[in-house]
Image: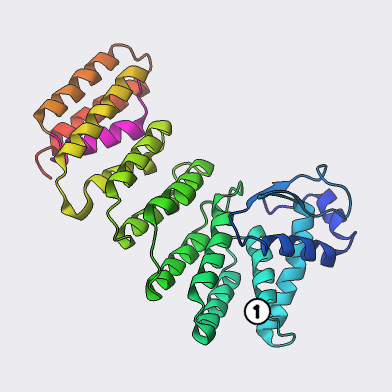
Amino acid sequence: MSRALDSGTKASLRSGDPTAAYQAISDVLMSSRDGLLEIEILGPTHLGAGQYVVRDGSAVGIPKIGLVKAFLVARKHLRDHLDGATPLTEDAVLAATAVILLLDPEYLTAANSRKRLIQRQLSLDGDAHSRLQRERRFVDSLLTSRLHRHTKSPTLWSHRRWLLGEFQKFGMPVDALGDITTVVFVAGERHPRNYYAWCHARLLVSLDKRPNDQEILAAVKTWCFQHHTDISGWSFLHFLLRLDDGRDTEAACSIFDEVLKLVSSLSLANESVWVFLRTLAASGLVGDKQFAQLVDIQQSLLGTLNTLTDQAVLQAAVDWCQTYRYRT
């Protein structure tokens, strides 16, 4: 969502009651106690004057002008609170910072205010499970909604990373498979080649001690097949195959063969999938048979590709693999 305001939007800001907008939007953001919200920012023609939220189950629509009005109120509340002029209750701090982060996911003061508040709450009552789960639902709602800047926000992903650290501190389990499928996959679809999301997936795998590696591997492989131009997903798939310096050649060879079949059947020439193939072929996890198949398919596809760019991708992949195959 762009933060730029046109002349019409600026004029609208001077009309209506910003406090009403703040109350309506903060109320809906504070209601995500049972599941994730699917938030979408609406244009000026979707809702009537004075209407700031439309909701259907977990789906929430908020007009941009209403959000800007609410943001101005929330920012003033938070500043007055931090300055000591008008202290807020704990719920009021969470409400104000929620509205701020919905408009600006890089508002570090708002994210840090939530951290301090949660840490203070945990030190006083120790109700770790409900408080941390509630915060995770809020952050995940922002990371998975159709909010372009939020899905790739370093501040929000850092906040989620901090939450996982608190989970560990209080002995709460991390569900890598669940978080990868419901949060990372969705964020990766909302914003392709989402570096921050897939780095977070690596963290999830390192923190989850339960034996679900094969389930994760199968889920990620399926995701990559459905998004075969996304190099970040392929990179994570290769990471899983190399976990803990493992040499799971059976799994690597099986996936390599499946990817080759996909490439051959669809005549794929995108760089993402070919970088995965060349890297896996040079990793030592697959043998001479798989490498020979790679070369055969490359030669077969070269004769069918019409653009020099596509041909260069395939040629570069095999050349790179031949250069580095025995150096890993």
* Residue 56 visible here: yes
Residue shown at the point (50%, 45%) measured from the top left: 186
Question: Residue at the spot x=51%, y=44% of the render?
Answer: 191
Location of the C terminus by quadrant is top left
Lateral position of residue 93 relative to residue 255, left or right: right
State the image coordinates of residue 143 (x, y, percent, origin top left).
Answer: 54, 54
Occupied quadrant, residue 274 = top left
Is-magenta flag for residue 269?
yes
Give the residue pinned by disc 1.
Answer: 90
Q: Is residue 1 visible?
A: no
Q: Which residues are magenta?
A: 267-286
Image point (37%, 35%), residue name: 222
In this rendering, position of residue 218 left or right of residue 195: left
At x 38%, y 65%, the residue is 173
Within 10 Å of the Cα at label 1, are there few (<14), some (14-19), or many (20+) other Cα atoms? few
Which amino acid lies under the numbered mark 1 shown in the image of this protein? Glu
Q: Residue 137: horizontal and vertical position, in percent?
A: 55, 60
315 vs 22: above or below:
above
